[in-house]
Image: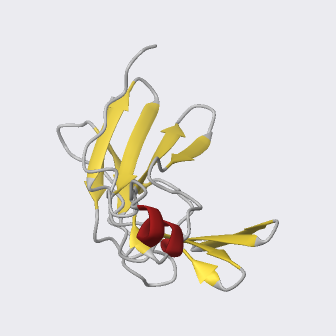
Amino acid sequence: VAIVVGAPQTMGPSQEETGGVFLCPWKAEGGQCTLLPFDLRDESRNVGSQTFQSFKARQGLGASVVSWNDVIVACAPWQHWNALDKTEEAEKAPVGGCYVAQLQSGGRAEYSPCRANTMSSVYKKSGFSDKRYCEAGFSSAVTQA
């Protein structure tokens, strides 16, 4: 048995405050906690004419943490995102996101339901439902589907 502890102001490998999640032994005498590995680097990915960027400095990883069996969900509500398309952009905004870690297999996945590739000009012209500032990850739960 272990305790999962979120620490949203932990310094990452590049000495930026990215947040972190620790796995600590459940022992009366205590014990050394282990920082769980998550990809804490900013990302930039090109798809066709668009570029998608995520920014993980000051993302607050560990602001909410939940676990079930060997699955841990750790969220970063202040993770920022931007999408660029030629000369337009969506504008860097705090969309937030959550990571799922499976301890036994080492598998990792990232979920960020508020990311979109809609450019800022589209939001301004059409009044399109703007999800850019939803800050997903202040709470989470794990269910058995």
Q: Taking 66 as reference, is 91 above or below it?
A: below
Q: Which residue is rendered at x = 56% and y = 63% of the image? A: 118
x then y, percent, for residue 54: 54, 69
Residue at the front extreme? 125
- On the rendered structure, is 141 left or right of 13? left
- In terms of depth relative to the viewer, which is nearer, 78 or 25? 78
- In terms of depth relative to the viewer, which is nearer, 96 or 143? 96
Q: Which coloring applies here?
A: secondary structure
Q: Which residue is rendered at x = 59% and y = 61% of the image? A: 117
Q: Which residue is rendered at x = 24% and y = 37% of the image? A: 27
Residue at the right extreme? 48
- On the rendered structure, is 77 left or right of 28? right
x then y, percent, for residue 23: 37, 46
- In terms of depth relative to the viewer, which is nearer, 55 or 83? 83
- In terms of depth relative to the viewer, which is nearer, 58 or 27? 58
- On the rendered structure, is 81 left or right of 87? left
Quadrant the N terminus occupies? top left
- How many labels, in total? 0
Q: Taking 141 as reference, is 95 above or below it?
A: below
Q: Taking 143 as reference, is 100 above or below it?
A: below
Q: Quadrant of residue 124?
A: bottom left
**Residue 33 appears anywhere in the view:** no
x then y, percent, for residue 126: 45, 62
Q: Which residue is rendered at x = 38% and y = 47% of the image? A: 74
x then y, percent, for residue 47: 78, 64
**Residue 144 appears anywhere in the view:** yes
Residue at the left extreme? 28
